[in-house]
Image (spheres, helix red, strand yellow):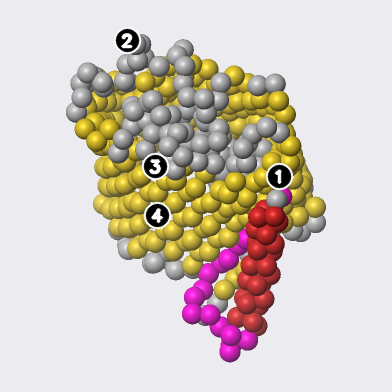
Amino acid sequence: MKASSTLLAIFFVVSSAAGAQVAPAIEGPYYRLPISGTLHYDLRYTQTAQFYEGYIEQMGVASGEAAYANTSAVHPFALVYSGGDSWIISGPQEEPGVFQHMLVSQGLVRRDWSLRLMDDVTYMPQSPVTGFSGIPGVGNLPGEPGLPTQPILTQNTRSVSNTVGSDFMHTFGHATSLDFGGRYSILRFPDGNGLDTDSVQANGQITRRLDARNSLFGQYVYGSFSYPAYSQLTMDTQSALVGYQRTWNRQFRTSVSAGPEFVQSSDNLLVPPSTNLTANANATYALRSSTTATVSYNRATSGGAGEATEVAIHNDDVTGAITQLFGRKWTVSATGSYIRTQGLALQLDQAVVTSAELGGVSATRRLGRYFTVFANYTAVQQSSNLGLGTNVVNGLSQVVGFGVAYSPRDINLKK
């Protein structure tokens, strides 16, 4: 509790210091900074109650975010840091502890091409259920995803991940564009209760615009996975997809793609070679600024799920989210996801099949210019045909959360 109070105090001190330093830069020429751009920060406190396996666990969480973006159209730069600390108020579980996330992005834009470099680092106490923290009920900070990024959900499983990558796009006239990208990622579990994984991904895509509403594209994706605990095992995947995009009107857009996926490994007895179907589909609806809705489906093979026994999986994911604004003060949102994973490595001549259903609703109300209060409910149901690790969610978990957030206006920095 002492560490948590200290962290919360640091957030407020840093925020106050930032405001004190920025104000002279705007008001007087003698205090101008060598950079220009926009600085945003927010702070929040949350309390949650989790109902799982017959017990009730109450937890407090202090978190915040600071984000900077410059104003350059030629050299766009962004830096985002968010993190916090959590502690148990009552209940039998171990303290989740600190969670952190930092994203750095640098771009270079020219008339007919652009390049972006990025580095993304996260430290989480468990697999993310809603937001990067992995803690249901905390609520998402601005710009964070609201749906899980790991296909098998776990608790009390600390992980560190780092992804570096680049994206290059070149346009040919007004109708054709060519995209290339690459990623290198590492995933580590300091407590040894997860599967450490290294992965490399490369992709290329060519898009042809048919008219103002319709586009066709072809995509190739290569992935390579290795495991420090299994030095002799590697797995490669190759996918070729053909897709179609359509803008139906100003509010509604769809995209769909599909193609074959080839899987090979260095140990055919453990991970047999296979040919699968990979597919992606999504639809987005936006009505001015009051309503937004998305639905997506993804089917692909990946190098693992973080769970210690699953070195390779084939997963099918369906996700959806909707947000509705009521006037200027109320925002209500709902999210849902179905995740099905099938292990490619056989256990007792059977494939491990795990399915998870997630759902959540949240409501936010503004109090004045800078404060908001929020409440949410999250439910997770996960099961498997074979036994998995003790840290894997097994059964129904429900979380109720409420909190308050402080989000001042953006600070404009000028040279």
**Residue lying at 58% horizontally and 37% vertically, measured from the top left:** 130
Q: How many marks?
A: 4
Q: CA distance from mark 2 to mark 3?
A: 28 Å
Dot in front, 4 or 3 = 3
**Residue lying at 48% horizontally and 61% vertically, measured from the top left:** 79
User: Which secondary structure lies at badge 1?
Assistant: strand
Answer with left or right where residue 224 lies relative to residue 386: left
Residue 188 picture location, percent across and down: 40, 42
Q: Is residue 9 above or below residue 313?
A: below
User: Does label 3 or label 1 sit earlier along the sequence?
Assistant: 1
Residue type at mark 4 is Asp
Residue 365 picture location, percent across and down: 77, 46
Labelled disc at residue 50: none
User: Which secondary structure lies at badge 2?
Assistant: loop
Q: CA distance from mark 3 to mark 1?
A: 27 Å
> Which residue is label 2 attached to?
349
Residue type at mark 3 is Leu
